Structure formats: structure tokens, C-alpha cells
Amino acid sequence: MVRYRLHCVGASGNSFKVALFLNCAGIDWEPVGVNFAGGETRDPGWRAATNEMGEIPVLEADGRCLSQSGAILTWLAETHGVFGASSADERFEVTRWLLFDNHRLTGSFAAHRVLQSMTPQPDVLAYVRARAHGALSIVEKHLAERGFMLGERPTIVDFSLVGYLYYPAEETGFDLCAAFPAIDAWRRRIAALPGWKPPYEMMPVGNSLPVLRCAT
Ligand SMILES: N[C@@H](CCC(=O)N[C@@H](CS)C(=O)NCC(=O)O)C(=O)O
């Protein structure tokens, strides 16, 4: 029996953050598809049984349903002793960047990806795009001086921040290779880790978020 079950959909970069940890750590897990487009996460029964917050990812572990990718990553790193902080200072840095990722990078980059599929008001899209560009620029500057976010080894901070950055440019609206060379080199370093796979291969399950899928 597998130890972990991850409730997810292929298009969910937040789920990919957790899947990436599990695969790179060589831990046995299986994806559990969610009918996202069909409203499963809004169903009161799903919320009562799986996640009262109505969100994926949810990691089923030891009879518990864990949610919030940053909290799950922290728990996994502590439980398995890999990809986590190795000092009090690093623990502070991990928390700092996980919060930055959630409210700033993923918070705008993922919103932009969904919004551009829904043809919103151009000024709304422009605002979210500028927020995402600003967050990417901060990460780009940080990575210009180091191999990974906390130095020269990968940690859960990298898995969190990179969560949405392997989806196709046609889908995200950002050509990272051209505009953010340090981010592009960093995501290639992460893609070279044993266990890495692109999101739709890692989580070939579930029912899509409203995003523009390209052919590949
Ligand atoms: N901060 C959360 C964000 C999770 C999240 O936004 N998940 C999306 C799918 S990628 C979701 O389930 N959204 C449901 C909703 O917004 O109603 C995390 O990191 O796990």
C-alpha cells in the first residue's frame, strides 16, 4: 500500500510543488484525481471529508488530510529529513520565501494564467501581470548569485517557487527563457534532479482548471 495519496489535478501548480518533493525524495505516492471543473472542491461533502478550505493539493498521510502546499512541504521535509532547513536561520529563510511564494509569486502568476483564459478586463489582467513580473524579477535577482534559493542545494523553497514555472508559455503567458535567464537556468537545474517530471506527466489525473492547454 502506498504511504501517501495526493489529491490533485495535472494543471495545479500548487499540487505539483508537493508531487515534485515526493518524486525527488524517492517516496512512494499516488495521485488521486479531483473533478475540479465539475465543482468537486465546492461540494460540502468533499470539504467535510477532505479539506474545509475547498482547495487542492491535499495530502493523505497517516490517516490525516493535510492541506496548504507550504505547510505540507514543511511537514514532509521534517518527517523525511530531506530538502528542509538545516539551521534556525535557514528555517526563517524557508518560512520567509514560502510566504513570499504564496502571496506574491504563485499568488499573481497562477492568477494571471487562469485570468487570461477567461478574457477578463484588460486592465485587471495588466495589473496581475505586472505583479507577477515584479515577483519574478525579485526571484531572478536572488538567483543571479546562487544555484538554488537558499544556496547551493535544493530545498522546499525551490519546489514551492518553481511550482508553476514548467507549464507551457502559451498557457502561462510568460516566456521565461527570454525574459528571466537566471530563473530559466535554475528551473533547468531542478529539472535535472532525479525524479523530476513535467506537471502533466507527474499528475496525469483530474479534471482541468480553466487554463488554455497547448498541444504538447
Ligand atoms: N495556498 C494554497 C493555494 C491552493 C490553491 O489555490 N489551490 C487551487 C488549485 S491550484 C484551488 O484548489 N483553488 C480552489 C479555489 O480557489 O476555489 C496552497 O499553496 O496549497
Image (spheres, rainbow, N blue to C red):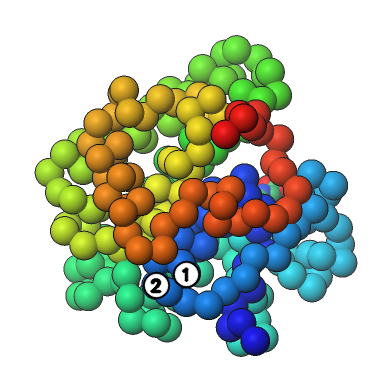
Distance (Cα) linking label 2 and label 1: 5 Å
Does the beta carbon of the residue at mark 1 sit less than 8 Å from ligand 1? no
The x, y position of residue 140, in whole percent, is 25, 36
Q: Is residue 184 left or right of residue 100?
A: left
Inspect the image, locate mark 2, and give the three-letter code of the amino acid beneath it: Ala
Q: Is residue 81 left or right of residue 146?
A: right
- Dot 2 surroundings within 10 Å: few (below 14), some, or many (20 or more)? some
Q: Residue at x 63, y 50 (%)?
A: 10
Residue depicted at x 73% and y 59%: 33
Q: Which of 77 and 168 is in front in this view?
A: 168
Q: Can residue 138 be seen in this view?
A: no
- Say which residue label 1 marks: 22
- For the point 46% across and 67% down, the residue is 23
| Left or right: where 189 falls relative to 26 | left
Above or below, comparing residue 214 to residue 201 in the picture: above
Does dot 2 land on a helix, a strand or a loop? loop
Residue 39 pos. (x, y %): 83, 49
Q: Where is residue 41 in the image (x, y as percent from the top left)?
A: 77, 56
Q: Mark 2 points at which residue?
A: 25
Residue pictured at 62% horizontal, 70% vertical: 30
Question: Looking at the rendering, which quadrant does residue 194 occupy?
Answer: bottom left
Quarter of the rendering occupied by the C terminus:
top right
- Percent across and percent down for residue 168 are 50, 33
Ligand 1 within 8 angstroms of badge 2 C-beta: no
Marks 1 and 2: in contact by CB < 8 Å?
yes
**Image quarter (top left, top right, bottom left or bottom right) of the N terminus:** bottom right
- Residue 206 in view in this figure: yes
Q: In this view, does 115 lie above or below 158?
A: above
Mark 1: amino acid: Leu
- Label 1, secondary structure: give it: helix
